[in-house]
Image (spheres, rainbow, N blue to C red):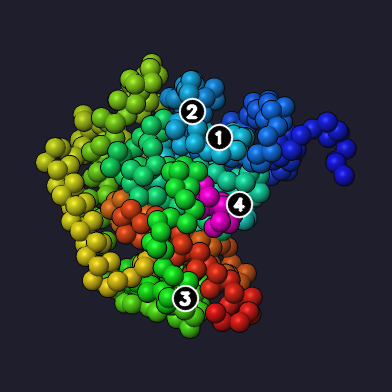
Amino acid sequence: MSRPGTAGRGPAQEAVAAALERAAAVAHLNAFITLDAEGAGAEAARHDRRGGGARRWCLAVKDNIHVAGLPNTAGTPGLAGFVPATDAPVVAALRAAGAIVLGKTNMHELALGVTSGNPTFGAVGNGADPALFAGGSSGGTAAAVASGIVDAGLGTDTGGSVGIPAALNGIYGLRPTAGRYPSAGVTPLSVTRDTPGPMARTLDRLAALDAFVTGRSLTGRAGAAPPPDRTLRLGLPRHVFTEDLEAPVRVAWEAAVERLGTARAVWVPVDTGHLVEFDARAGMHLVLGEFAAAFDRYLAGHRVGRGTAEVVDAAADPAVAELLRTAALPAGPAYPGPATLRGAVAERRALQAAYAELFAAHGVDAILSPTVPVCARPLHRHEDSLPLNGREVPTFPTLIRNTSPSATAGLPSVTMPLPVDGSPPVGLQLVGPRGGDRELLAVAARVDALLRRREGGGARP
């Protein structure tokens, strides 16, 4: 039976109407910068008129990924008037698979932060608890997915901007291998590290989104995924990634280690401290050294009508503006020169080689860790620092600690929610070898099933 006032609506229009109703109910989350009710409704009506039986579903798109006819602010005042004429290829691929874009989501300004506390468009509330921050920089997409407004969402990831908000909101997220998704039509930070990435409330939908974007079979290459009767080999980090965890994260992580160790999985201890050291010498130098040239090309190529310095000067977040002025523009006093950038590129190659050697030497299917060492914190209070185990620590490096090394190396990673008892969401990160995205999703599906089956008290497989 249809709801009152829905007579004559087709299934696509029903899907959009339900999404808009939910968006209104959770408007306090501030998940959207542009909610395109009129455009989404018109697109749904066109689909319903054409028929054909294809299921239509609602998609949220981070506001630094182009959607034709909608503003692409990248969360910053200097781009507020920029309206792209065409979809980014990643959006076009999902539209072809049945997506209807509901709107553009809020984010940390210029994707350069981890809380999505945006001073221009407002802070994003967490989809699991609106009093907490959503994480970033793709916080609006994560909140829109977690709160049930949309079926799926697109974010971007440079050092953890998909994995961090997915983990803090209790949903699934994929950072694909660098270069696997098309990057055209995406406001850049670092050409070396940037990638679009999907989020969803289920792992099956996450895998479907990846297949839609890449055109790959849902099952991946024949024989590539580990057979379901083979014991998984899971890398257990000895250093850094599993240390200095907030109590709820530590409890959820240790429970997962215990559950997986008694199921069809074996833990293989791996040394990971050197991965963090390589990343420290490469990660931010790549972002700061690549930003200006990439942003100049982007603004000129899309005829935005403003230069990089103008956009940076108009930035509303003092921390973002200061970092870019001093360290990411060639005239800035802390700008990494060509020699520093060349050194960072060399360190990145060494990091990639170290990961490849680790996978080859230990034969692990994935390296696991908590996605973020802390849970989400209250809105507006922890942009700069937060308490962790009795001391005050800087927010940005703390939240990206576990996600940045694999992101710098360009490796695929999947974030999934861990079972928790009375705490905010906690995420589990699985990192796979370069190009092994479909295999990693298959491993994640087995890990997820093992954790959920044990959680529910079912028989051990």
Q: CA distance from mark 1 to mark 3?
A: 36 Å
The residue labelled by disc 1 is 95
- Identify which residue is drawn at 37% across, 74% down: 233
Q: Residues within 10 Å of mark 3 (few under 14, many from 20)?
A: few
Residue 413, given in percent of the width and then of the height, sits at: 40, 57
Between the residue at mark 2 and the residue at mark 4, the CA separation in whole angstroms equals 24 Å
Q: Label 4: how many residues lie within 10 Å, few (<14), some (14-19) or many (20+)? A: many
Q: Quadrant of residue 12?
A: top right
What label does residue 229 carry, if any? 3
Report which residue position mark 2 lands on. 87
Q: Is residue 26 visible?
A: yes
**Mark 2 or mark 4, which is nearer to you?**
2
Amino acid at the residue labelled 3: Asp
Q: Which label was assigned to residue 146?
A: 4
The amino acid pointed to by label 4 is Ala
Q: Is residue 383 left or right of residue 132?
A: left
